[in-house]
Amino acid sequence: DAGVIQSPRHEVTEMGQEVTLRCKPISGHNSLFWYRQTMMRGLELLIYFNNNVPIDDSGMPEDRFSAKMPNASFSTLKIQPSEPRDSAVYFCASSFFGQMNQPQHFGDGTRLSIL
Amino acid sequence: KQEVTQIPAALSVPEGENLVLNCSFTDSAIYNLQWFRQDPGKGLTSLLLIQSSQREQTSGRLNASLDKSSGRSTLYIAASQPGDSATYLCAVSGSSNTGKLIFGQGTTLQVKP
């Protein structure tokens, strides 16, 4: 079991640039979650997918943020244009969603710094 | 709107001590409650998951309890070790079983040798 894989681990870029974060969920999992973690706001759910379909994107802060899941093994979170206040650690998590919820498994996150 | 609160925010104890971490939530209509551990620079690791119909779950030295009616959960750590030092977060999912979790701010635990 390779776990949830996120890339890159660290990203430093200038304000206004496009940022793309990537996630590979655990094979066999059918739910995928994107979170953002900051000191001020803690861990916030941005969007989640079930069977590759976005279910709830109410946590996406602005239209600058978008997420896709083209297939069961890959998802992206894109910020365009990026702003300094987007600096945070972004986590991807996956789980098997069914009759009984299973624990979510988290990747190690992408630490994003927007200058 | 569901809110999750964890007290205390930080805790420092000597090795070997038994300790309790607290979690409270405002809406008792939950599907499950989960406790996670986060080490610095790492993602979250699931420790225990309690379904709403359950009262407690145990794994090794960890025991988590759930009192839905009062909106509370506790994580009990027996015989604490320096390796237990980490941030512990609790999270609740809504009654509609969507898998969506609302997290508390966490309790940062330091166990001194």
Image (cartoon, coloured by chain):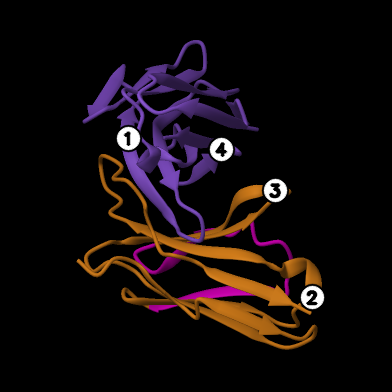
Q: Colour of chain A?
A: orange
Q: Are marks 3 and 2 in contact (CB under 8 Å)?
A: no
Q: The chain drawn purple is chain what?
A: B
Name the mark on residue A113.
none
Tell me the SS state at disc 1. strand
Tell me the SS state at disc 3. loop
Q: How many marks?
A: 4
Q: Residues within 10 Å of mark 4 (few under 14, many from 20)?
A: many
Which residue, as the protein is rendered here, is positioned at the far front? B113
What amino acid type should be assigned to the residue bearing mark 3?
A: Arg
Tell me the SS state at disc 2. loop
Which residue carries the number 3 mark?
A: A41
Q: Are marks 1 and 3 on the same chain?
A: no
Q: CA distance from mark 4 to mark 2?
A: 27 Å
Give above or below for A44 relative to A7. above
Q: Nearer the viewer, residue B85 or A10?
A: B85
What amino acid type should be assigned to the residue bearing mark 1?
A: Leu
Which residue carries the number 2 mark?
A: A83
Determine the chain carrying the residue at label 3. Answer: A
Give above or below for A6 relative to B47. below
Which residue carries the number 4 mark?
A: B106
Tell me the SS state at disc 4. loop
The answer to whether residue B27 of the structure is visible from this angle is yes
Determine the chain carrying the residue at label 4. Answer: B
Q: CA distance from mark 1 to mark 3?
A: 24 Å
Q: Earlier in the sequence, mark 4 or mark 1?
A: 1
